[in-house]
C-alpha cells in the first residue's frame, strides 16, 4: 500500500500543478489584435450589357435525303435490248430520257394484229349499216308500223359498233404496250443503283435499279417543343405560297471545306417521336445540284448537315458577352456599386461565340464580368475594369479601388499588382 501511494502522490501532484498553471496562463494571456483589413479584391475585366435586335436561331442536325426516290420497273415483260449509258451508279438522267428499252418486235406484231382487227370490225359495221338501211326501206314499202327492233337490225348494228370499239381498244392497248417497251425517266434524276443489263429478260414490276430526283432534297430536323415555340411554328405546320416557311441555312464539311446551302422549312411531321418526344420539321433545298449548290459542292443525299433555322425577330433583347455566362446559365454581374460579384441565373434565348441573348430584364449599362473567377461566390470583392467598345480599359474610381497596402489579384490576362490589373 505504501508503495502504491508513493507512486500516485507525485503523479497527482504534477497533474494539479499543470492544471493550475494552464488556468493562470489562459487568464492572463494578451488579447489577440483584430485586423480591420477587408478580403482581397479580385481585379477583373467587365463589359456593358446592351439591348439589341436579333433573329432567333434554332440549331439542329439531320441527314440529307431526296424528296422523291423510286425503283425503276417495267410495265411490260421481255428481253432488254438497250440500256442508256447514263444508267449507271452516279449517272445523271434528264427527264424523258430512255433509261432502258425492251425488245419491241412482239409489241409491233401486236399492233399489226390490232389494226387488222379494226379493219375487220369497220367492214362488218359498214355491212350491218347497209343491211339495216335495206331492212328499214322494206318495212316502209310494206307499210308496217309495228316492226320489231330485230327486223330493223338494230341489235346487229349495235353489236357491230361494239366490236369496232373493242378493236380500237385493242389497238390502243397494243400501241401503249409498244410505247411502254421504252422505259423513260419521269424526272431529272441521278442513279443510285443499277440491277439490269442488255440481254436480260425482265417481267412487269421487276426492279431495274433506283433513281432519285435532283429537283429537291430535304432534311428531317428533330426539334423540342420549346424550339418550335421559339420559331413560332405550330405542331401541324405546312407552308403556303402566301406564307412561306422560315429560312434555314445548312452547313457541312465537304472536300475539307465548310459548305453552305440555303433552304426553307416546308412542313412538320404528322406526329411526335414516341421515344425522344421530338417532332421533325422538314427543310428543303431546291435544285441542289445546280442553282442551289455551294459552288462545286451539291447538297447530295447522305450528307450529315447542321441546320440553323431563322425564327422571328426579337426586338430590344438583352445582350451579354458570351464569356460572362458560366455553368448552368449563371450570369456574372457587378453589383450596383460595382465593387462585388453578383451571380444571377438567367434564361438564355440564344447564344453563339459572340454573345448571348437573354430573356430576363437586366438594366442596360450593367457590367458583365468577362474574366475567369476561381471559386466564385456572391458578394466576392472585385476591382472592376470596364472594357469599352474601342478596346480601351476604363479604370474604376478611386473610392472603388482597394485600400493602401491591399493586394488585388489580376485575372483575365493581367499580373498580380498592388494598384490594379494590366491587360
Image (cartoon, rainbow, N blue to C red):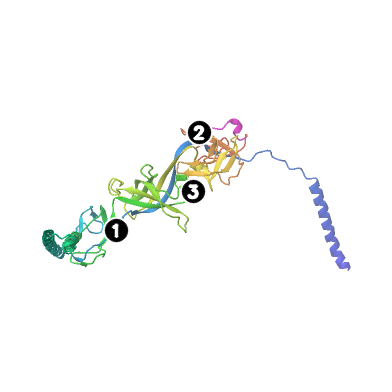
| Magenta residue check for 95 | no
SS at badge 1: strand
| Magenta residue check for 395 | yes
Q: Which residues are magenta?
A: 392-402
Verify CB contact (< 8 Å) between mark 2 and mark 3: no
Verify CB contact (< 8 Å) between mark 2 and mark 1: no
Reading the image, the residue beneath label 1 is: 70
Instruction: Give percent across and percent down for residue 313.
Output: 44, 39
Q: CA distance from mark 1 to mark 3?
A: 36 Å
SS at badge 3: helix
Reading the image, the residue beneath label 3 is: 226
Q: Residue at x 49, y 43 (%)?
A: 349
Instruction: Give percent across and percent down for residue 35.
Output: 69, 39
Whether 155 is drawn above or below 422: the answer is below
Q: Is residue 378 visible?
A: yes
First in sequence, mark 2 or 3: give its number: 3
Amino acid at each position: 500500500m505504501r508503495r502504491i501511494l508513493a507512486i500516485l502522490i507525485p503523479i497527482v501532484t504534477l497533474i494539479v500543478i499543470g492544471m493550475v498553471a494552464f488556468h493562470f496562463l489562459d487568464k492572463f494571456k494578451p488579447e489577440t489584435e483584430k485586423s480591420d483589413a477587408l478580403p482581397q479584391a479580385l481585379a477583373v475585366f467587365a463589359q456593358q450589357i446592351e439591348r439589341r435586335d436579333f433573329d432567333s436561331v434554332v440549331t439542329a442536325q439531320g441527314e440529307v435525303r431526296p424528296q422523291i426516290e423510286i425503283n425503276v420497273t417495267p410495265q411490260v415483260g421481255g428481253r432488254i435490248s438497250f440500256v442508256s449509258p447514263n444508267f449507271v451508279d452516279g449517272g445523271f438522267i434528264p427527264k424523258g430520257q430512255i433509261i432502258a428499252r425492251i425488245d419491241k418486235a412482239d409489241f409491233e406484231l401486236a399492233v399489226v394484229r390490232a389494226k387488222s382487227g379494226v379493219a375487220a370490225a369497220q367492214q362488218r359495221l359498214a355491212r350491218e349499216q347497209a343491211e339495216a338501211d335495206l331492212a328499214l326501206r322494206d318495212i316502209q314499202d310494206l307499210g308496217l308500223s309495228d316492226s320489231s327492233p330485230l327486223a330493223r337490225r338494230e341489235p346487229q348494228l349495235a353489236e357491230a359498233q361494239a366490236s369496232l370499239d373493242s378493236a380500237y381498244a385493242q389497238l390502243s392497248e397494243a400501241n401503249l404496250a409498244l410505247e411502254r417497251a421504252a422505259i423513260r425517266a419521269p424526272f431529272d434524276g441521278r442513279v443510285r443503283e443499277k440491277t439490269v443489263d442488255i440481254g436480260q429478260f425482265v417481267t412487269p414490276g421487276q426492279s431495274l435499279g433506283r433513281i432519285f430526283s435532283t429537283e429537291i432534297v430535304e432534311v428531317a430536323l428533330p426539334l423540342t417543343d420549346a424550339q418550335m415555340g421559339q420559331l413560332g411554328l405550330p405542331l401541324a405546320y405546312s407552308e403556303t405560297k402566301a406564307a412561306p416557311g422560315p429560312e434555314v441555312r445548312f452547313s457541312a464539311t465537304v472536300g475539307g471545306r465548310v459548305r453552305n446551302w440555303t433552304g426553307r422549312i416546308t412542313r412538320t411531321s404528322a406526329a411526335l417521336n414516341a421515344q425522344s418526344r421530338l417532332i421533325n420539321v422538314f427543310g428543303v433545298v431546291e435544285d441542289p445540284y445546280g442553282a442551289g449548290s455551294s459552288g462545286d459542292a451539291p447538297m447530295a443525299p447522305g450528307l450529315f448537315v447542321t441546320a440553323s433555322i431563322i425564327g422571328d425577330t426579337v426586338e430590344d433583347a438583352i445582350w451579354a458577352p458570351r464569356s460572362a455566362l458560366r455553368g448552368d446559365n449563371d450570369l456574372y454581374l457587378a453589383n450596383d456599386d460595382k465593387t462585388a460579384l453578383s451571380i444571377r441565373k438567367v434564361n438564355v434565348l440564344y447564344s453563339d461565340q459572340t454573345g448571348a441573348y437573354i430573356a430576363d430584364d437586366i438594366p442596360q449599362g450593367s457590367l458583365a464580368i468577362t474574366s475567369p473567377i476561381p471559386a466564385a461566390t456572391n458578394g466576392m470583392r472585385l476591382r472592376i475594369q470596364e472594357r469599352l467598345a474601342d478596346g480601351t480599359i476604363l479604370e474604376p474610381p478611386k473610392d472603388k479601388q482597394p485600400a493602401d497596402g491591399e493586394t488585388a489579384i489580376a485575372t483575365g490576362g493581367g499580373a498580380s499588382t498592388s494598384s490594379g490589373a494590366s491587360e
